[in-house]
Structure formats: C-alpha cells, structure tokens
Image (cartoon, coloured by chain):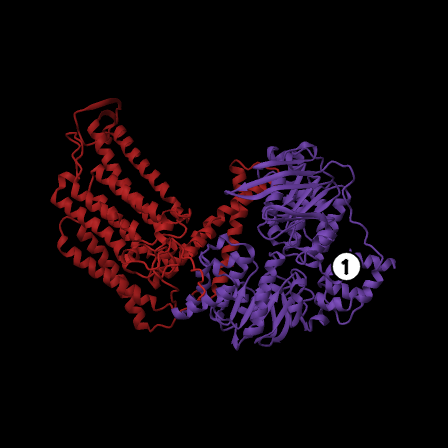
Amino acid sequence: MIRFSGVSVTYPEAALPALAGADFEVPEGELWLVVGPSGVGKSTLLGAVCGLVPHFSGGTLRGRVTVAGRDTRTHRPREMADVVGTVGQDPLGHFVTDTVEDELAYGMESLGLPRDTMRRRVEETLDLLGLHELRDRPLATLSGGQQQRVALGSVLTLHPRVLVLDEPTSALDPGAAEEVLAVLQRLVHDLGTTVLLAEHRLERVVQYADRVLLLPAPGAPPVVGDPAEVLSRSPVRPPVAELGALAGWRPLPLSVREARRRAGALRERLAGRRPAPPPGPAPGAAPLALARRLTVRRGGSEVLRGVELRVGPGETVALMGRNGAGKSTLLRALAGAHRPTAGSVELAGGVVPHRTPPARLVRHVGLVPQDPRDLLFAETVAAECAAADADAAAAGVPVAPGGCLALVARLLPEVPPGAHPRDLSEGQRLALALAVVLTSAPPLLLLDEPTRGLDYAAKARLVGVLRELAGRGHGVLLATHDVELAAEAAGRVVVLAEGEVVADGPTAEVVVASPAFAPQVAKVLGAGPWLTVPQVAAALEEA
Amino acid sequence: MPIRLPRPRVPRDRPPRPGAAARLRAPVATRSNALHAGAWWLWALGLATAASRTSNPLLLGLVIAVAGYVVAARRTNAPWARAFGYYLALGAFVVALRVVFALALGSPIGGTRVLVTLPEVPLPDWAAGVRLGGRVTAESLVFAGYDGLRLATLLICLGAANALANPARLLKSLPGALYEVGVAVVVAMSFAPQLVADLVRMRAARRLRGRSVRGARALLQVARPVLEGALERSVALAAAMDARGYGRTAAVPPAVRRLTAALTLGGLLGVCVGAYGLLAAAGAGFGLPLLAAGLAAALAGLWLGGRRSPRTRYRPDPWGPRAWLVSGAGAAVAVAVGWANGAAPEALHPPAVPLSAPAFPLWPAAAVLLGLLPAVVAPVPADAPGARTPGGRAARTAAPAPESAPAPEAAAQDCKEARP
C-alpha cells in the first residue's frame, strides 16, 4: 500500500539527512507504529507519505514514495487527499471551518463528491466516532479528546485507504486516548484501512501494532520488524517491555495481559519485599502551598469547587484528572493568576499569591505552563537566561554564579547558548523553561503537563531533576495525564473531577485503585506496592 | 374480563395532531430548516432603504424598533449575534457626533430661534464658507438630529443583519469562483479569536516571570512570540488544507476560460457605466438596462468561472418559503415607504424650518410594521436566549412544531447542551 524505495530526505541548510535509507512496504490493512527518540525524523517520514514532504516542507527527497500506486513526485498532496488521510499533532491547527459537521464535510467538498454521498458519509462518521451529539458545536468549545476525534473524522469521510497519524494521543487523558485507539482498531479490523502512526506513549499503542518501524538514531536507516523483536533493541520502550527485559522474558511482552501470564515467578521473587518509601514532606514543616475550600469561577461556571490541597517541602504531588477537570486552573490559582471566588490560597510565610505583585511572587512560586514556549520571549537561549537573571535580581534573589546559564548547562548539556528557543525540541524547551523558573529559586514549583511530546529519555531526565529538587526541600506539584510519570516522580496523587478533589493519598494507593490511572507495572504485578520498573530493579538487586 | 392497562400518558405540551395554524408557526431552527443568510440581508437592506427615504424621527424610530424586536426574537447565542448592542451604541454616537458638528461648525439651515451664541473663531480668507462657533439655532440642531438619526438607522439595520445571519454560512452561498475569498475570510475569522487567546496566555506567562504586564514595552515583547505562533499556525493550516484536497482544479477548455474572462470584465464595466448613468442627473435612460445587462454578464462569468473548481457544497441552506417571506417583508417595506415618499413627501420629511412637531404618518408606519414578519415566520434558534428557560416563549412556540422539526424534548436537550 505504502512503498518507500531508497528514500532519504535532506532539509536545506542541514548537514545530515533527516531520514535516510528508508526502504520498506506497508501492506494493506496493517497498523504500523513508528518509534524512536525525539528529533529522529518520525514526522519527516510521516509527512513523506502524503507528499507534504517535500512539496510543502521544502528539502530534497531522493528515492521514491508511492501510495496505492501514486508517486508523490508527480502527485501533489491535494491529489493524494482521497487516498491518504493525515492528522498532525495539534488538531486545532488542522481545522478549516468552525463547526463539527462542516469540518467533517470540508474534505469531501474539496474533492467534489455528490451531495447525498457527503450527507450519508457525515452521518456514518458521526456515528463511528460518537460525535452525533456534538454535530452543531463550534470546534473551539470541544475538549482535547473530542477535537482529536473530529480531526480523525474529517479525514475519514474521504474514505482514505491510508491513515497517517502523528502523536494522536499525546495530549489526551487515558480515557480519551482509549476512545481514539478503539476507533483506530475498528478501522483496521472492519474496513481494512492501513494505518501508520507515530507515538511517544508506547504503552498506549504498542499492543495494537502489527509491525514496528524503529528509527534508532538521526540519519540511521529504519528497522522494521515484529514489535516484540524490534523493541528488544529499541532505545525507547514502554514500561511493560522494560519489565520484561529486566525479568529476562523472551519475546518481550507488549501488553499487560501477556506480561501478567508470565509474571508468576517474578511475583514470588518480590514477595515479602517492599519498595523504598517515596520521600514525603518533612514532618511538622509548614506547608509551601495550602488551599482551603478554594472555589474559582470563570466565565460563569465554577471550575474549582471547595478544593483542599496541601503541598509540603520535599514533597512531589501529581495532580490528575480528565481534560477540563480544573488542573490547570488550580495551578494558576496557586501562581496568583486567578483570584479565588471563595476560600483561600496561601503560600509559605503567609504569602497570598493573587495579592502579591508578580515581581515579588517569583521568589515564592514558579509555574511552567503547558506550552513552555509561552514563557520564552527572547531570541536566543543566552538572552533568555540573561533576562531570567535580571528578573531574579529584581526580585531580590541572590543569583548563583553563572545563574540561569549554569542551570541550562546542567539540564541541557547539548544545546548551544546561541540557539533560538523555538528551534529546540519539546524536551529541550521544557528544560529551558524549567531553568528560567528555577533561577529565582522558588520553594514551590508547579508544572503543567510537562511530558507532552517528551520521549522516554527526556522523561527520565525530568524525573531525575524533580527528585533532586524535592531532595533539596522544594515542593513540586505537577498536573499530568501520564500515569507512568506520576508513579515514578510523585509520592502523593490528587485526583480532580469536575473541579472537586475526589481522591488524595499516597501514589501507590490512589493509582492502583483505578484501572485508568494504574501504571503498567502495577497492573502486571497485581495489587502489590510495585509501581515502576526502577523500584523492581532495585528490589531484585538487593535479593 | 379483559385486563385494562393504564393508558400511556401523552405529554401535555404536545397535542396529538397539530392543526393548520400550528403547522404555520415557526419551527425550532436546525441545520435543515435554517433560514438562508441572504434572506436576512435582503430584509435588513429593505429596512435600510426605507430608512434612507425618510427623515421623520418617528418613522426612523419605528424602523429601529422593528429591527431591534426581530433581533431580540430570533438571534442566536453566537458571538456575532451579541454584537447588536454595539451597533446601537454606534448609532447613538453617530447622532451625538452629528449634533456636536452642527453645534460647532454651524449649519446651512438658518432658523430664528437662537439657543446660544458661541464665541466665533475668526478664520483666514481661504477658509471662506467654514465657520467655527457662532449662533446655534434650535432648527439647526433639530435638522442635524434628524439627519444623524437617519444614518444611525441605516447602521442599525446593517447591525441587525449581522446579528441574525451567520457570516460563515453567508460566505458559503457565494458563487464557486469566489470560494477562495470566502475561505480566507472564514479562516481569518477563526484566527482572530485565537490570536486574542494567545495574547492573553502570553501576558499571563509574562506575569509568571515576575514582569509587569502593562506598558508598551510589555506589549511589544509579547507581540513578537504571538505573531510567531500565528505564523507557525497558518503554515500548519495551509499544509492541512493542502493535504485535504484544497485547491484541486478541474480541466476547462481554453475557449471557456476566455469567455469567462470576457463576460466578467465586460459585465463589471457595464455595471460601472450603468451605475454612473443611474446616479448622474442626465443619463437615467440608458442607466438601468445597462446595469442589468452588466450584472447578468458578470454573474454568468462567475458561474462559468465556478466550473474550474470541482467543489461541491455540503448541505447548502435552501431558499424556502420562509426565506421568501423574510426577504419579501423587507422588500415590501422598502417599496411602500418609497411609494409614500413620492406620494406624500412632506409627511416623510418634516421641515426643520419652521420648527414644528413631526406628524406621525399612519400608512407608512403601518408599512414599516410589515418588517416584523420575520419575528413570526423565521425559525426559532435552538440556543436563543429566550429558549433557555423551560416553558419560556421559545419552548411554547416549539411545542406544536411540524414533523420536520425535532421533538420538544430534543430541543430542550439542545438547550442543555448549549449551556456552557
């Protein structure tokens, strides 16, 4: 269906090709997963399928890409539209019209399909994706999961034989991600659609893949093979495969179910042991953040209602809940961006965030927003750091020698100070924003959805940094959909639903109690105290 | 003995068989029975034409009241619908401005009742005919007020069309050759709110870095990343549109292409010359036929040009009986007031000199009231402010809806959904 023959792509002003030696064929009706660390050329590969690379992106493509017999050299993306459906990372960037129904019809209108066919297909697609109740809604009012489904639907109405998806579930909460993946499953099984999909969160998708295409390093030729076999040599793999590798299971398990069947011996070896307790707050210490019966109303609706929250020094707390549950609002209320409608928010030393001028507040609390780009204004990393040092000095914080630039050098050793912040990868940008915020040394650090677009290596580095910060007495509160991150980094989990706290307790108790929030290791090893692969590894070393 | 089952309860608000009168009542608007956006514009332009034919403040006030009532009865909750208030404010501003100008610059209307004499600024010779300050007469103020009110009424009529017609749907009704323009406008309309949202987010982020969010420097520093983001997003959108088949063209023979160009250009030229003939005092004879011919040629050119694009339209708004009634109501008002202007000009233009209370012309006023017809015949928007309260006006109107409209339960469901 999709055939790459000796394809390499080189962008202008790049020394190395972004993709090289791609030579493979995706048969009809299979689901292929593209894996690899950040910046390895996954998006380039996906873009080459529909012809956006090189017709739209520029650069030179050598070799040949054909989809259903059409060569992308002679067919522009618009002429491939009826064969290939492409959905990018950000569904909002994909929308052309303003309501759900019009968006679903847009592609068909461009192809000039007859009216009754369009009508029938829109109704079918609304049903297939469970969107019929939203048909008249403006796109901007939809939640992230709904937007992703509409974006998928907008290409499905063209009945493409190939679907190309770039990170379809990264921004979604576990429930919404399962909805999207269930639809994909149905397309592959019932309609024989060929799907090529890239995703950082392998734990969500790898069990559905027929084959895995691994891009091991920038410019290295892709490796195609059976998922279990390819993952055994992949630098990135989901926790369940990591656990399998640790326990020496061959072939590697890909789903929790497979791993569970073989986990008997491992469970026995671990019996009677317990993981080291996560670092908790220093006993008796005053809290760094305290919300009491906090209610925040925005635009007429209550986003937070009666929230009680306490973050102590040396403690890492994960804030979870579905999209739109009020996580970001709670973080922003702690950072002084929202005035409480009722109740109170207090930081250490009796500081009330929304009454403190911003220049003084940076000494008490730092927030890294969902998109770290929001925090970056300057044109180079060095200029950004100089500005951060100046901000810290203005706030009266003694800046360490080297200041922000020293922090950047530690968090991001490979980035030159002259680079433009927008040219960095997601993980590098997050690290830069973190360094900027940490320059003022706030005791309370807030992170909003920090793992969006991060690969496993970047995530592991983030966990290391957060552990170190907690060890030095910082309090960390992170809002996240990523159950694996919560399990690794947080000692306590708070679950929000509809603006209310519905669970608050040690990570091991809260996440294991809910199937949606349980990390893979906990699912494999049963109701025990084990949550992460490093915990298990440490316990096995002792034994 | 037969067992008697309890009879199923029929909901009280739905009579088992709607009568003929009930069938004629306006249904709740859905995508299928939505009123064509062009009908609203024709209605509003009819009202505006009527308003331009009179300077009687009572009649103008009636036109504003009619437009306002229809907007109140039939507008949705969409952002453009909420803009009607701004048009009212703009109208008031126009009247005030006109009066202030008359106050400061004087007026060609003489008048005898001097209200106040402002100190006059002596102006050099080359500014002859311009006066600053001086006598202010009641007549000149009244005349300025009438004149300003007429302009305000025109603006408010346009505002009513803007509030009632969905701009995106209006653009969808454009001929195929103008499709690209329509897409550009729709994309711009969805980009503007995103840009504002970005700006708000960036300013909040600036605060997080401990900097002030006020002042020109803050705005400049925020503006650059916002514009960069907008640029990135538009490139992404262009790629997405291309990948979804935007800009596909069909093969058209060269003869047809040349004919298209000739018709469009010739037609536009005809329209220009015809319009000039109509407006110029001398040549009213050839103006109208030339205008009509030019318009026909231009439309034919547009229609032919549309054949180059293979696009089809998904669920275009039908032009049904209700659209005829709405646009007809506007046209009727325009024709009736225009006729009255010819028959009894003094009633429609109350003189400012000598000062007198304007009379209320009964028959033209009755004709303006025809403009209320859309408030009865146009479909009731499901998310109208009035439709929110159960048992409210809209809910009662919706109950005996024809078969094509959704059941009242469904409408109520829609209301719940629409609530943020």
> Which chain corresponds to the colour red?
B
Query: Which corner quadrant holds the C terminus of chain A?
Result: bottom right
Q: Which residue is mark 1?
A: A533
B90 or A45: which is nearer to us?
B90
**Res. A32 image quadrant:** bottom right
The percent coordinates of residue B402 (x first, y second) are 33, 59
- Disc 1 on helix, strand or loop? helix
Query: On the rendered image, what quadrant is the N terminus of chain A found in?
Result: bottom right
Q: Amino acid at mark 1?
A: Val
Badge 1: residue crowd in 10 Å (few <14, some 14–19, many ≥20):
many
Image coords of residue B188 (percent x, y)? 43, 53
In front: A357, or A255?
A255
Considering only vertical position in the picture, is B353 above or below A489? above
Question: In x, y percent, where is residue B284?
Answer: 14, 52
Q: What is the drawing colour of chain A?
A: purple
B337 in relation to A160, above or below: above
Seen at 72% across and 46% down, the residue is: A316
Q: Does residue B414 appear left or right of residue B48 in this picture?
A: right
The structure residue drawn at horizontal position 61% and vertical position 76%, both measured from the top left corner, is A25
